[in-house]
Structures are given as C-alpha cells and as structure tokens.
Amino acid sequence: MHISEIFESIQGEGPWAGTRSLFIRTSGCNLRCSFCDTPYTSWRPEGTARTVDELIHEVAASAAPDVVITGGEPLLVPALPSLIEHCRDLGKRVTVETAGTVDLEFTCDLIAISPKLANSNPFGTDWESRHNDARLRPDVVRSLLNRSPGILKFVIDQPADIEEVMLWLGQLPDIEHSIVWLMPQARTREQLREKSEWLRELARSHGLNFSSRLHVEMFGNQRGT
C-alpha cells in the first residue's frame, strides 16, 4: 500500500478528540474535494510503498493507544482489513476515516464517515462531474455502519449547508442523530473560530453534535499534525 505519512498526534475531531493517536495516512483518493487539506493524497498523490508488516512494526513501537487510519481514501487499499486486524491484535483502538463511497468488508472500533456535500465540488476542474457523481453513496454508508460502530461527520462551510445535511439524513431515517457531527470547513485558526461560533448553535438547534477541529486549533494547517 502507498503511505503518505505516519505520525503521532492527537485525534482532532469527533467523540475521541484529544486522544493520543498514531496516524497512518494512505495516499490515493477517488474524490477531489475543493477544500481538501491533504492534497498530497488526492490532487497530487505522493507516497511510499509499505507492507503491512512494516507498518505493524511502527504501530507496535508506538505508545499511542489509538491508531487512526485515514487518507486519501483508505478503503481503496485492499490490505486495509489485514492492517486493522493486526493493529487490534496489538491492543490498539482503531478508527478508520472515510468519505463513505467505497465498500470494503472489515470491522474496526470506530468508522468515521464524512459524506461530502455540494460544498466540496471542485467546480471548473476536470474532476467536477466525476466527483459530484461519486461523492454520495448512502447504500455504502449503511453497509459500513452495519459492520462497525460509527459516526457521520459533515463538513459545513455556510449555514445553508444544514439543509443538504438534513435531506441526506432523510435518506437514512434509521440513523440516530446522536452519531451525527457537524464540523467547520476551516484551514486556519481564524476560520475555525469564526465558523464555530454559529455552527455550535446550528448543531444544537437540529439535535446534532458539534465537532471542532482540535488539531487546527493547536497547530494550524500543518502537515503531520
């Protein structure tokens, strides 16, 4: 598998925010979000070929209790189930972060699915139609949530985005709002601060969770954090 980076930091989003984690970031993605904060895994993919055995050696050497496998889109990696299994055998709690457009059979401790709204469309690029056609797969999301405990994380750029979120959730009426998180589209501390002010109230008024982006708060938009 191609890995763009491995680093220790804290989980910045969702219910386990603040937890010390070892991040394994795969390279390669089937989407091209306009606001992608890891373009080195999508728009300009880079990475080093690594075996599962090599990665597990690094996982075993880390004192972090959690492993977060992210991307790019890690579900494009056929060896992902094996990597997860070996991490859990080492006693690690494993989160997999995905856009929820690719179905792959595995079980983890938390699957964090971030369905992409229309605000992610890369308008005016060669990827516009392909991205828009692929970004929403409620059937895949349902399949993934049937196998692992999970959450849904929606990236919100403007208050009006909540309308699309609620329409999307209407396609999966059995999903409890307690697993749905809204988080700001923000690359800087200033953007995060400004959008968090109104997004907290928006989430509360719709019975949804608010997630800050703790890594942006602490480190800004720095690679390897």
Image (cartoon, rainbow, N blue to C red):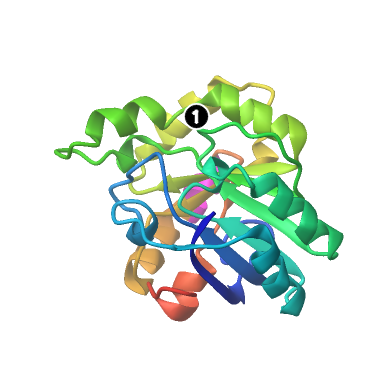
Nearer to me, 119 or 36: 36
Q: Position of residue 119 (x, y in %)?
A: 31, 40
Which residue is depicted at the point 76% across and 34% down? 147
The residue under label 1 is 166
Nearer to me, 213 or 109: 109
Q: Main secondary structure of the magenta part?
A: helix
Within the image, what quadrant is residue 138 found in?
top right
Badge 1: few (under 14), some or many (20 or more) residues near its Cα, within 10 Å?
few
Left or right of 85, for residue 144:
left
Nearer to me, 116 or 23: 23
Q: Position of residue 168 (x, y in %)?
A: 49, 26
- 181 drawn magenta: no
Inspect the image, locate mark 1, and give the three-letter code of the amino acid beneath it: Met
Where's the N terminus, which quadrant? Answer: bottom right
What secondary structure is marked by label 1? helix
Residue 80: in sight, yes or no?
yes
Q: Position of residue 199 (x, y in %)?
A: 45, 52
Q: Is residue 125 above or below residue 137?
A: below
Left or right of 83, for residue 192:
left
Which residue is depicted at the point 76% across and 60% down? 87
Q: Is residue 118 above or below residue 214?
A: above
Q: Is residue 202 above or below residue 219?
A: above
Residue 19: in sight, yes or no?
no
Q: Which residues are magenta?
A: 200-205
